[in-house]
């Protein structure tokens, strides 16, 4: 199973004959029956952490491999990536004012930073191995974009909307993580297919709205304001929550199967992209709600 996250769609934690992807996910008690672990020293072993016998005395043969990904690795890399986003966002907020005399310049820098972040994200997504410099570079430029946009929203719409968006993003992350750990959310192939179909439909509608807005003027099809804007904002947040569940599943399976430690950078990259998605949808939703007061 592949995650709907653009990074994990390209870089699954398990591979088959060199192709990125994911197969037969392990359940809560361990790998699924018949699942081949591509990271195990023994290609026929399902779990690299399970004790193996030497074939003669029945005792353990060798300890688990070193250099495999752990939850601590993912947490550390994610903290570094998100920390970079937050740091550059704060700097952009302070150094790129959005008053009337500087608004055009600040917006131009923000759009340029967003384009650079997109290019870095695409380059990393198509590379076979994670490059920390690309991932941190993406985080830095994404932070500049978020800082300027957040400052503008706070200045011209509502001073408290950014705090609300941050708190909302944190609440979604904590809620999905708790629900996932409690197994209230089960990532299956059907779940994956539903999320992918919903994501494709959502993106197509947003692109259509953008095109109508650019060429027809106004608010396009109305998906970004009013009642429809609120509805699509909620749907965007729900979709982001589904992305998180898929990302958590990929991380869990990477740890279970003994993925190389460097894959923790890809996990951090994917989680950061999903959290940025949720934050932007939260920011837009609270902005609309604030404007309707």
Image (cartoon, rainbow, N blue to C red):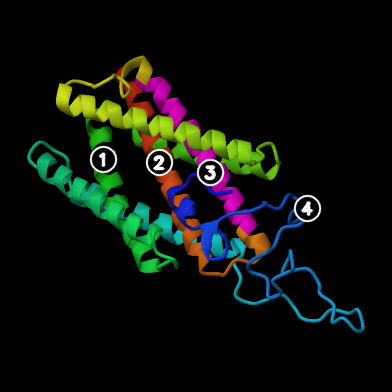
Q: Nearer the viewer, residue 201 or 105?
A: 201
Badge 1 marks a residue whose secondary structure is helix
Task: Indicate whether residue 237 is drawn in magenta.
Answer: yes
Q: Nearer the viewer's eye, disc 1 or disc 3?
A: 3
Specify the label residue 29 is tagged with: 4
Residue 171 seen in the figure = no
Vertical side of 18 occupied by 282: above or below: above
Vertical side of 253 occupied by 104: above or below: above
Drawn side of residue 128 relative to residue 145, left or right: right
Magenta-tinted stretch: 229-253
Badge 2 marks a residue whose secondary structure is helix
Where residue 261 sits, quadrant-wise, is bottom right
Q: Earlier in the sequence, mark 1 or mark 4?
A: 4
Badge 3 marks a residue whose secondary structure is helix
Task: Indicate whether residue 20 is drawn in magenta.
Answer: no
Residue 186 x %, y %:
67, 40
Give how far apart the Cα atoms at labels 4 and 3 are. Answer: 21 Å
Q: Earlier in the sequence, mark 1 or mark 3?
A: 1
Q: On the image, numbered disc 2 is attached to which residue? A: 277
Q: On the image, numbered disc 1 is attached to which residue? A: 149
Drawn side of residue 11 relative to residue 93, left or right: right
Q: Nearer the viewer's eye, disc 2 or disc 4?
A: 4
Give how far apart the Cα atoms at labels 1 and 4 are. Answer: 44 Å
Residue 18 seen in the figure = yes
Q: Nearer the viewer's eye, disc 1 or disc 4?
A: 4
Give how far apart the Cα atoms at labels 3 and 2 are. Answer: 10 Å
Residue lying furthest right: 57
């Amino acid at each position: 199973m592949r995650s709907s996250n653009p990074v994990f769609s390209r870089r699954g934690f398990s591979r088959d004959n060199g192709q990125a992807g994911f197969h037969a996910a392990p359940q809560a008690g361990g790998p699924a029956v018949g699942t081949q672990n591509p990271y195990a020293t023994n290609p026929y072993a399902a779990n690299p952490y399970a004790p193996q016998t030497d074939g003669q005395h029945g005792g353990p043969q060798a300890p688990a491999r070193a250099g495999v990904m752990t939850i601590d690795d993912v947490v550390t890399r994610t903290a570094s990536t998100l920390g970079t986003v937050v740091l550059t966002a704060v700097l952009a907020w302070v150094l790129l004012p959005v008053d009337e005399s500087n608004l055009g310049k600040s917006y131009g820098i923000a759009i340029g930073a967003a384009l650079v972040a997109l290019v870095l994200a695409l380059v990393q997504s198509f590379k076979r191995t994670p490059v920390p410099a690309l991932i941190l570079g993406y985080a830095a430029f994404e932070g500049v974009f978020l800082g300027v946009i957040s400052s503008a929203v706070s200045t011209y719409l509502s001073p408290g909307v950014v705090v609300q968006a941050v708190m909302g993003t944190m609440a979604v992350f904590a809620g999905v993580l708790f629900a996932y750990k409690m197994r209230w959310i089960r990532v299956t192939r059907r779940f994956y297919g539903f999320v992918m179909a919903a994501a494709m439909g959502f993106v197509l509608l947003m692109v259509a709205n953008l095109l109508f807005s650019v060429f027809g003027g106004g608010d396009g099809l109305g998906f970004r304001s009013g009642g429809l804007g609120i509805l699509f904002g909620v749907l965007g947040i729900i979709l982001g929550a589904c992305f998180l569940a898929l990302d958590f599943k990929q991380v869990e399976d990477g740890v279970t199967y003994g993925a190389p430690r460097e894959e923790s950078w890809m996990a951090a990259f994917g989680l950061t992209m999903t959290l940025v998605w949720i934050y932007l949808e939260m920011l837009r939703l609270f902005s609309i709600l604030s404007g309707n007061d």
